[in-house]
Amino acid sequence: MNRLNVFVGDSLSGTLGRQGNTHQFKYLPDYVGPPVFLGIPLKEKELSWSEFPPAFDGLLPEGVLLEQLLAKWRLDRADKWGQLIAVGRDLNGFLTVLPEDADEVPFGKVTPGQKMGKRAPIDPDKNALPYATTELVTFHSKRKLQMSISGVQPKVSAVFARADGYFRPVEQNGGYILKPSPQAYPTAPENEALTMELARQAGIAVPRCGWLPSKDGLGVFWIERFDRWGPGNRNRLRCEDMGQIIGAPSSWKYLGSLEKIADVIREQCSNPRLQLVRFFERVLFCWLSGNADMHLKNWSLIENGPLIELSPAYDFLNTHLLLDEDEESALELDGKKVGFNSDLLVDYLGREVCQVNDRMMDRILQRLAGLQWDLTIHASHLSVDDSLQYLRIVQERMNRLGI
């Protein structure tokens, strides 16, 4: 049987084995640290799957990064075992996966009870990206990719050189993610920067992020990683997306429901009543802002000190400006992906599913209604036409909610 060592921080937790199509995870008999995944508790000393385990599948790259990985490592698309070996040194969250015979130690570390760390804030200026967009998009294709970030858009791992005031792309262990303009959706960075700023104004927890021009003038969205910090970004926190938690591979990320996410929050979070309120608020904000791509991998839980809670928000953007689509949600709500209204969102999801009380509901609706949508949208880097279309979407949905 082929085996990989699975580390939580720098502690060996167990092994992932493969024999034919069967995969097996075993905890070490003396391992007492946090479980590798929320869905694989320590009491489950040994688990087997007849295919590649979904929780590990959720660690693998997608989209452009996956294509670069397959090309440079000459891997088959179906060879997820080989893909995990390639990127296992730098994964989302606190895991490191290394071949059993590897003569190396994991880079990250986990401190029990460690709360989410904070970096000193940065304020990059317009010269902080001295690279052409093509240099960023192809950065990981010119070397053997050894890191993984989920999502289909092009992404680059980076650190911020404070002394020089610019971002520097790195092969591993970056503290920031750069998202250059994808060829198919050239206004995505401007869109995401605006939507994340609106979310921040709405009181939703978002990482530090923003928009910058590249050397050729095209936009790049940058965002701080919240699952790592400290010297060399060595300190790591558990961060799992909903697909990993419920055992759905990445290819099933659109096959789920908002009710199922609410169930996971109730089962896994340390303070579920508060987290359900935050979940409802994010769903409502995403719908108002035209985001129809909040699939299972765009909802995550993080281990923040003694608490399991919703991670800071990410991948918030108005997809209706980018895609010609009718769906209003990536995941079903009461069996629907279109035709959302106040009855479905406020009464059913908010009051019935998430148990939001009337006082909190009024506060959330008033905060969203009072947001300076028009001023913020028109002050963004979007074109005038896109700004007007963005605002029309918000206004039409506000009218549907009656706020």
Image: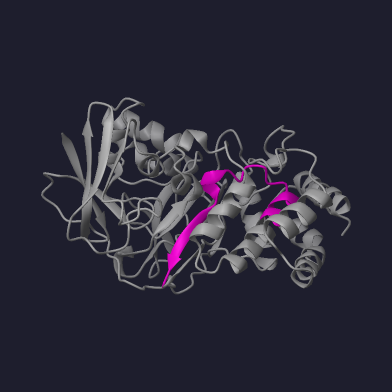
Quarter-of-image position of residue 321: top right
Instruction: Classify 164 as above or below 380.
Output: below
Tell me the residue at 24%/59% (across/down). 107
Classify residue 316 as left or right of residue 337. Answer: left
> Which of 97/21 is in front?
21
Classify residue 362 as left or right of residue 267. Answer: right
> Which of 324/2 is in front?
2
Tell me the residue at 27%/61% (across/down). 9
Classify residue 400 as left or right of residue 102. Answer: right
- Look at the image and tell me whether residue 67 can be seen: yes
Tell me the residue at 21%/39% (across/down). 17
- Residue 310 in the magenta stretch? The answer is no
Assign the N terminus to one quadrant of the image. Answer: top left
- Residue 292 in the magenta stretch? The answer is yes
Assign the C terminus to one quadrant of the image. Answer: bottom right
Tell me the residue at 76%/52% (across/down). 348
| Numbered range of the magenta stretch | 283-305
Q: Position of residue 190 (x, y in %)?
A: 63, 50
Instruction: Classify 53 as above or below 76.
Output: below
Q: Position of residue 73 (x, y in %)?
A: 27, 32
> Which of 111/358 is in front?
358
